[in-house]
Amino acid sequence: VGDAQEVIYTTSKKGKKLLLYKSFTYAKHNTNKAGGKWYCSSQRSKRCTAQVFLGNNGLLTDIQIQHNHEPPEFHIDKYGKYI
């Protein structure tokens, strides 16, 4: 579905690991032997149902990215970190 180059990892303001894919952020929900499920980080606040599935190999295996909101705004600091 997607390749690892499209996926970027960053951290939330609270220090939690986030996955950044096509301008939207996702928080890890659960993992199993096949990989992990990541929900839109606005799942609770905006009731967004978008999610991605990341295989153990780091590749996206399935995406369901129908967001009901605009993507968050990010900029890159001098160390290359998304904030």
Image: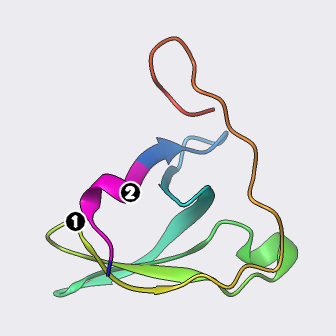
Residue neighbourhood size for the residue with mark 2, other residues' Cα within 10 Å, grouped as few (<14), some (14–19), many (≥20): some
Q: Considering only order in the chain, which callout, 2 or 1, is on the residue closer to the N terminus?
A: 2
Residue at the location (55% across, 33% down)?
82
Q: Is residue 17 left or right of residue 14?
A: left
Answer with left or right where residue 29 lies relative to residue 57.
right
Disc 1 to disc 2, how far (Cα)?
Answer: 9 Å
**Residue at the location (38% across, 57% down)?**
7
Q: Secondary structure at mark 2?
A: strand
Q: Amino acid at mark 2?
A: Val
Residue 69 sits inside the magenta stretch: no
Residue 33 occupies which quadrant of the picture? Answer: bottom left
Nearer-the-camera pick, 14 or 7: 7
- Residue 7's tag is 2
Q: Magenta span has 7?
A: yes
Q: Residue at x 54, y 65 (%)?
A: 27
Q: Position of residue 12 (x, y in %)?
A: 61, 45
Amino acid type, callout 1: Gly
Residue bounds of the magenta highlight: 2-8
Name the residue nearer the viewer: 52 or 12. Answer: 52
Give the SS element for disc 1.
loop
| Residue under numbered circle 1 | 58
In which image quadrant can residue 6 be found?
Answer: bottom left
Colour setup of the view: rainbow
Left or right: residue 30 versus residue 55 is right
